[in-house]
Image: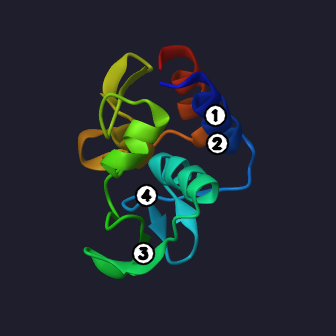
Amino acid sequence: MKPEIKARWVEALRSGKYEQGRGALRSDTNQFCCLGVLCDLYAKETGEKWAEGGAHGEDRFSLLGNDLVLPRSVARWAGLDGVDPDLCIHGRELGVSGHNDGDLDVGRRPKPFTTIADAIEEQL
């Protein structure tokens, strides 16, 4: 990952300026998943606009046609190898979206932005 973008992403996740959400990059109530925060940094730098509604519902925004998954162009801009980079948090390796969203059916609690930021800083 590009060091300058990683630093901005980690800072944004820790800033308290983004309310954490699950299941979408950005909800219509301006809750963001951690990948949505990265998308927002991209949008602010490039001038790309979020679009209301998404392929998976009107209760979300999309960026570059994506409302659930990090757009490949954002991943390339950030210097990521894929659209859902793996992180190991508390001994469990998952894509960053899995740590953000959790899965209570299998006993995996969502991780807060600060925990995800620490892992990004150390591992990407």
Do the residues under discs 1 and 2 have CB atoms within 8 angstroms? yes
Residue type at mark 2: give it: Leu
Q: Residues within 10 Å of mark 3 (few under 14, many from 20)?
A: many
Kindly state the secondary structure of the residue where label 4 is placed. loop
Instruction: Tell me the residue that label 4 is attached to.
Output: 22
Q: Mark 3 — residue? A: 60
Which sits earlier in the primary sequence, circle 1 or circle 4?
Answer: 1
Residues at circles 2 and 4 in contact by the CB criterion of under 8 Å: no
Q: Is residue 30 left or right of residue 71?
A: right
| Residue under pointer 1 | 10
Q: Between label 2 and label 4, give the one nearer the viewer.
A: 2
- Mark 4 nearby-residue class (10 Å; few <14, some 14–19, many ≥20): some
State left or right for residue 40 relative to residue 78.
Answer: right
The Cα–Cα distance between marks 3 and 2, rounded to whole angstroms, is: 20 Å
Residue occupying the point 66% across, 29% down: 7
- Indicate whether 123 appears above or below 107: above
Tell me: 90 left or right of 113: left
The amino acid pointed to by label 3 is: Arg
Q: In front: mark 1 or mark 4?
A: 1
Name the one closer to the observer, 20 or 86. Answer: 86
* Amino acid type indicated by mark 1: Val
Measure the alpha-carbon separation of dots 1 and 2.
5 Å
